[in-house]
């Protein structure tokens, strides 16, 4: 069975590759949407951003 | 072996995208999506729509992954049962190894993503559900005990609890009751199916109740579980997720369901064979409607509550 440039196999696999591609694209969009939603909601956003984390700073005495 | 025979791999039975999707058991997944959605929506805490959508999706993928792992483990049984012979592995489209890798990857991905999208409690319950369905039920108990369905039912009962946990971050009486409804409903539902699909299970050597203890005992079991289910289902009406709509629906549905179970219990085999298991088939269809309408009624109560109506 010779594999030629445009083998029938390529045509058959096209739909599968397309499906995987679109699924991955949808996943990226979903994670992006989740990130935006979480930022808007103001979830705890402390991360490794090279600045002191509020939660570990000593509490300042109130006046 | 000649040169020509080196390259004889047959590509005509290649798996398509749809075959991998079929590994996720889409019909079971639709039940998972629906009940998880209800669990999430009836919770007293509102969830951002995108977070809610993503969470339901990851719960569905987690459920689908357990389906794929179940098909990997049960390929030998599926090949002999008429109902499952056309599944991707027995039909030769997907190899058992591919299904296993696919299932494990999706399971890990779903749990991690649910933890990130919602919270660790929801992710933890999802992980436990997958473990319970694949390891405890599929690998451990299904081929060993006729009570397999009772235990396996627990796995299918977790999704509304996960949905609830996505919103609230915890477990409470309401989510335990939603769990219990599905848990108690599963045995009569599947035993009714086993009564008229008995030959398949016998051929596959799965110790379903009618195969091991006979049909008479199965009929009695269906009735007992249906009777135990009723107070659990009606009881949910008196919690924060219930209300008059749910109470009315639940009472009527339970009367209908119990009447069906009593009918099955009173029939003997000759009558059942004579009318080709009409009552059993009808009970099976009613059971699907029973669960759908119970969760539908909970959904209605939830929507009404958000408009300031519903509830007690």
Image: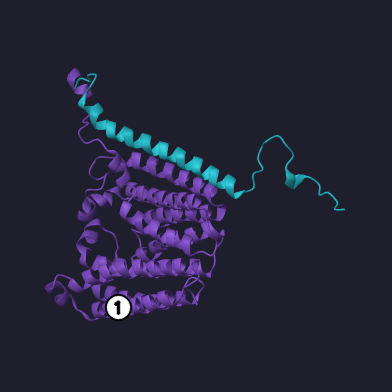
Q: Sort mark 1 into few (<14), some (14-19) or many (20+) by Cα contacts within 10 Å.
A: some
Compared across the picture, whether B155 is left or right of A41 comes to: left
Please report the residue visible at 48 percent of the width from the left and 58 percent of the height from the top: B162
Instruction: Pick the residue in front: B162 or A3.
Output: B162
- Which colour represents chain B? purple
Instruction: Pick the residue in front: B4 or B98.
Output: B98
- Which colour represents chain A? cyan
User: x, y percentage for residue B190?
Assistant: 30, 65
Instruction: Pick the residue in front: B93 or B204.
Output: B93
Please report the residue visible at 29 percent of the width from the left and 64 percent of the height from the top: B208
Please report the residue visible at 55 percent of the width from the left and 56 percent of the height from the top: B121
Q: Is any part of residue B158 visible from this angle?
A: no
Compared across the picture, whether B263 is left or right of B139 comes to: left
Residue that sits furthest to the right in the current view: A63
Instruction: Pick the residue in front: A29 or B127.
Output: A29
Compared across the picture, whether B87 is left or right of B252 comes to: left
Please report the residue visible at 38 percent of the width from the left and 78 percent of the height from the top: B248
User: x, y percentage for residue B127?
Assistant: 48, 52
Residue that sits furthest to the front in the current view: B307
Give the quadrant of residue A21: top left
User: x, y percentage for residue B49?
Assistant: 48, 52
Q: Is any part of residue A61 visible from this angle?
A: yes
Secondary structure beneath label 1:
helix
Chain where mark 1 sits:
B
Give the quadrant of residue B297: bottom left
* Residue of label 1: B256
User: x, y percentage for residue B207?
Assistant: 30, 63
Relative to residue B92, is residue B261 depicted above or below?
below
């Amino acid at each position: 069975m010779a594999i030629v440039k445009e083998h029938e196999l390529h045509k058959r696999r096209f739909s599968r590759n397309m499906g995987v591609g679109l699924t991955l694209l949808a996943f990226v969009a979903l994670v992006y949407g989740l990130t935006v939603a979480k930022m808007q909601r103001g979830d705890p956003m402390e991360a490794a951003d090279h600045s002191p984390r509020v939660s570990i700073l000593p509490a300042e005495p109130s006046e | 072996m000649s040169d020509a025979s080196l390259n004889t791999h047959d590509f005509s039975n290649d798996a398509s995208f749809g075959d991998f999707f079929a590994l996720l058991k889409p019909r079971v997944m639709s039940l998972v999506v629906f009940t998880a959605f209800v669990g999430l929506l009836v919770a007293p805490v509102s969830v951002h729509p995108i977070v809610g959508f993503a969470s339901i999706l990851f719960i569905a993928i987690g459920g689908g992954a357990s389906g794929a792992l179940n098909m990997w483990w049960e390929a030998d049984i599926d090949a002999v049962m008429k109902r499952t012979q056309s599944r991707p592995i027995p039909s030769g489209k997907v190899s058992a190894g591919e299904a296993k890798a696919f299932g494990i990857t999706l399971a890990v991905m779903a749990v991690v993503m649910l933890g990130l999208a919602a919270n660790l409690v929801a992710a933890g319950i999802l992980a436990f559900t997958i473990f319970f369905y694949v390891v405890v039920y599929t690998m451990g108990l299904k081929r060993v005990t006729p009570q397999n369905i009772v235990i396996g039912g627990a796995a299918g009962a977790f999704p509304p609890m996960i949905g609830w946990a996505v919103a609230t971050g915890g477990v409470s009486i309401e989510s335990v009751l939603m769990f219990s409804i599905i848990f108690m409903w599963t045995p009569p539902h599947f035993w009714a199916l086993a009564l008229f699909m008995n030959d398949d299970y016998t051929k596959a050597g799965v110790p379903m109740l009618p195969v091991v203890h006979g049909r008479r005992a199965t009929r009695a079991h269906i009735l007992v579980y249906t009777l135990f289910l009723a107070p659990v289902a009606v009881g949910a009406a008196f919690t924060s997720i219930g209300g008059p709509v749910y109470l009315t629906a639940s009472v009527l549905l339970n009367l209908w369901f119990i009447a069906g179970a009593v009918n099955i219990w009173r029939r003997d085999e000759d009558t059942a064979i004579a009318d080709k298991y009409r009552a059993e088939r009808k009970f099976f269809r009613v059971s699907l409607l029973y669960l759908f309408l119970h969760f539908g009624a909970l959904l209605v109560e939830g929507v009404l509550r958000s408009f300031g109506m519903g509830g007690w």
